[in-house]
C-alpha cells in the first residue's frame, strides 16, 4: 500500500472508501460535483480513474444508460451513519430520486469501507455487502488502493479482483477522466 494511504490507516480517522456512479444526465458533471463535495468530507482524498460500465441488475427493468463509476478514498473521522447521511445529501443535491432500488440515477454514492469497521444496522452496513462482487467498484479501487484489505475476507482489493477474474471476464471499460477543482485532483 502506498505510504499516504498506509499513514491514514494508522490515524484515529478511518480510511474510507466511497464508490461513485452516474448514468443519467451529464454524468461527468454529476461525478465532478460529487468529487468536489467528497474532498471536503474526506481528508487526503484520492480519486480513481472512472470507468464506463453497463447496468448490473434486474433485466426485466429494461435497458438503462451506461454508468461512469469510480471511487474516492480518504480519511474520515465521522461516524458511519453521519457520513452516510452526508452522502445522501450530496445525491439529493445532484437531483437523485429513488423511485425504486435499481432506478437510473444522476448520482449514486455508496459507503464501501471505513477502516476495519464492521457495522450492521438497519441504516448502515459496512463493509458494503456486495462490493466484492462488483467489478465496477473493485477495478477503480485497485487503481488507487490495490493493497487495501477487506476486513471481512482478509483479502486485498487486488486479490478480490483476481477472484472475479477467475469467474468472470473484465468489464469492457474505457478509463475516463474528470476535472475536479483543487490541488488534490487525481483523476
Image (tube, rainbow, N blue to C red):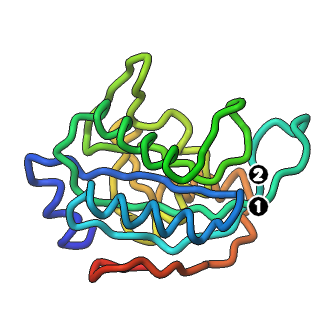
The answer to which quarter of the image holds residue 102 is top right
Q: Nearer the viewer, residue 144 or 1?
A: 144
Most distant residue in the top direction: 122
Q: Position of residue 117 (x, y in %)?
A: 27, 35
* Disc marking residue 21: none
Q: Position of residue 112 (x, y in %)?
A: 42, 44
Q: At x 9% / y 52%, what residue is drawn? A: 11
Closer to the camera in the image, 98 or 2: 98
Q: Is residue 118 above or below residue 67?
A: above
Disc 2 or 1, which lies upstream in sequence? 2
Mark 2: secondary structure: loop
Q: Which residue is mark 2?
A: 55
Residue 43 placed where, x, y %? 21, 61
Q: Residue at x 21, y 50 (%)?
A: 76
For disc 1, the neighbor class at 10 Å (few under 14, some 14 to 19, many from 20) is some
Residue on which the image places disc 1? 66
State the image coordinates of residue 71 (x, y, percent, origin top left). Answer: 46, 60
Q: Secondary structure at mark 1?
A: loop
Nearest the camera: 70 or 164?
70
Query: Between marks 2 and 1, how big is the CA–CA gap?
Result: 6 Å
Q: How many marks?
A: 2
Whether pointer 2 and pointer 1 mark residues with C-beta atoms closer than 8 Å, the reply is yes
The answer to whether residue 84 is left or right of residue 159 is left
Amino acid at each position: 500500500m502506498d505510504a499516504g494511504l498506509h499513514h491514514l490507516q494508522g490515524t484515529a480517522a478511518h480510511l474510507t472508501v466511497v464508490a461513485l456512479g452516474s448514468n443519467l444526465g451529464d454524468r461527468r458533471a454529476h461525478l465532478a460535483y460529487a468529487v468536489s463535495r467528497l474532498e471536503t468530507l474526506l481528508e487526503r482524498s484520492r480519486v480513481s480513474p472512472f470507468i464506463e460500465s453497463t447496468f448490473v441488475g434486474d433485466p426485466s427493468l429494461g435497458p438503462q444508460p451506461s454508468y461512469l463509476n469510480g471511487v474516492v478514498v480518504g480519511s474520515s473521522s465521522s461516524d458511519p451513519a453521519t457520513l452516510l447521511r452526508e452522502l445522501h445529501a450530496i445525491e439529493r443535491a445532484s437531483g437523485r430520486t429513488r423511485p425504486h432500488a435499481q432506478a437510473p440515477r444522476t448520482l449514486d454514492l455508496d459507503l464501501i469501507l471505513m477502516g476495519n469497521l464492521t457495522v450492521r444496522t438497519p441504516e448502515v452496513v459496512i463493509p458494503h455487502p456486495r462490493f466484492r462482487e462488483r467489478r465496477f467498484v473493485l477495478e477503480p479501487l485497485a487503481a488507487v488502493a490495490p493493497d487495501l484489505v477487506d476486513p471481512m475476507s482478509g483479502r486485498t482489493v487486488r486479490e478480490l479482483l483476481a477472484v472475479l477474474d477467475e469467474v468472470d471476464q473484465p468489464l469492457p471499460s474505457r478509463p475516463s477522466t474528470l476535472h475536479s477543482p483543487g490541488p488534490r485532483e487525481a483523476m
